[in-house]
């Protein structure tokens, strides 16, 4: 058993896998929970280690429920459904519930160990924050926040209009984003994270210039350790449409600014 603080790493490749494979929300949380639980038992090897790769691991269903993988009840139907889903995928060599449906047993495939070995760029996730997520978009936003918080000027993008339809391994056609539909889903999610993490967000809709309509959404965010200036985070030239979402207590104060959210010569 390795020492653990409730946090675990996933490589950028794994982030992209979750983001664009169309995996149902419940199954994403299930997969991340197993990676989290296995990270508590081992250090993921950087090179092939058959002794570790050939082991099976187990966890009681209560541990998985604590990570938000299923309703808090004694019903195992949700887990049975997840097992059925992931048994069709290349990520597991073994995955099943014991005879009394109280414990889950799994063995990740070589594919997962290959993905987890590439930690040159990774995102540090918190198991309890994953449990806090309520939808697939909620999880995408959280992973974006977790993966970019260490930047001086943190930002990430979501809703790629070119990735809605894929054919023959490439892009098929462009589907412009619908701001009204996106706002209805995105605004309450960002407000929850703003209040929970004391983060201020600026949401900007982008146009790539090749087709009419919005092609992507960029989310810039400010916290106490970021170093945004107001003229940077609010970018009217790049953002064709933008708005901000802040905690109920107001804009967070950056450490780089002694009296306001932004430096004194650029305050709100």
Image: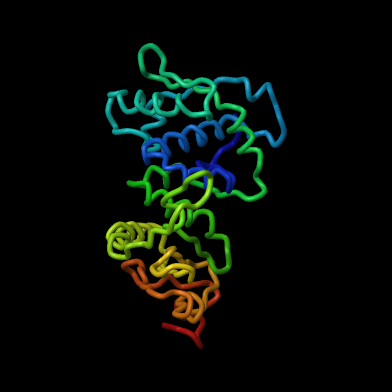
What is the quadrant of the C terminus in the image?
bottom left
Residue 97: x and y in percent read 41, 18
Say which of 141 and 103 sits in front: 141
Q: Which residue is drawn at 48% across and 75% down?
A: 238
Q: Which residue is drawn at 28% across and 24% down?
A: 74
Q: Which residue is drawn at 49% across and 85% down?
A: 266
88 to 232, vertically: above or below: above
Q: In this view, does 176 lie to the left or right of 149?
A: left
Q: Which residue lies furthest to the right in this view?
A: 47
106 to 261, vertically: above or below: above
Q: Is residue 167 left or right of residue 79?
A: right
Residue 25: x and y in percent read 37, 41
State how many labels appear: 0
Say which of 149 and 210 sits in front: 210
Residue 6: x and y in percent read 50, 41
137 to 45, vertically: above or below: below
Residue 54: x and y in percent read 62, 20
What is the quadrant of the N terminus in the image?
top right
Q: Is residue 187 left or right of residue 16?
A: left
Q: Residue at x 38, y 28 (%)?
A: 82
Q: How is the image coloured?
A: rainbow
């Amino acid at each position: 058993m390795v020492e653990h603080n409730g946090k675990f790493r996933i490589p950028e490749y794994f982030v992209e896998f979750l983001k664009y494979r169309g995996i149902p929300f419940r199954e994403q949380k299930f997969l991340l929970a197993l990676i989290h639980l296995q990270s508590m038992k081992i250090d993921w090897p950087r090179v092939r280690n058959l002794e570790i790769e050939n082991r099976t691991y187990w966890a009681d269903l209560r541990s998985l429920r604590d990570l938000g993988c299923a309703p808090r009840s004694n019903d195992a139907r949700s887990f049975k459904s997840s097992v059925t889903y992931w048994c069709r995928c290349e990520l597991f060599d073994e995955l099943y519930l014991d005879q009394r449906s109280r414990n889950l047993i799994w063995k990740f495939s070589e594919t997962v160990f290959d993905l987890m070995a590439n930690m040159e760029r990774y995102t540090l996730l918190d198991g309890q924050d994953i449990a806090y997520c309520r939808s697939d978009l909620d999880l995408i936003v959280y992973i974006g926040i977790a993966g970019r918080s260490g930047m001086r000027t943190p930002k990430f993008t979501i809703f790629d209009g070119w990735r809605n339809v894929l054919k023959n391994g490439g892009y098929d056609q462009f589907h412009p984003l619908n701001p009204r539909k996106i706002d209805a889903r995105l605004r309450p999610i960002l407000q929850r994270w703003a209040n929970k993490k004391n983060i201020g967000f600026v949401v900007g809709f982008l146009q790539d210039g090749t087709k009419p309509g919005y092609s992507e959404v960029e989310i810039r965010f400010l916290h106490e350790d970021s170093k945004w200036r107001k003229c940077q985070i609010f970018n009217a030239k790049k953002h064709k449409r933008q708005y901000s979402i802040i905690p109920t207590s107001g804009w967070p104060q950056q450490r780089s600014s002694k009296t306001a959210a932004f430096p004194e010569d650029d305050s709100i």
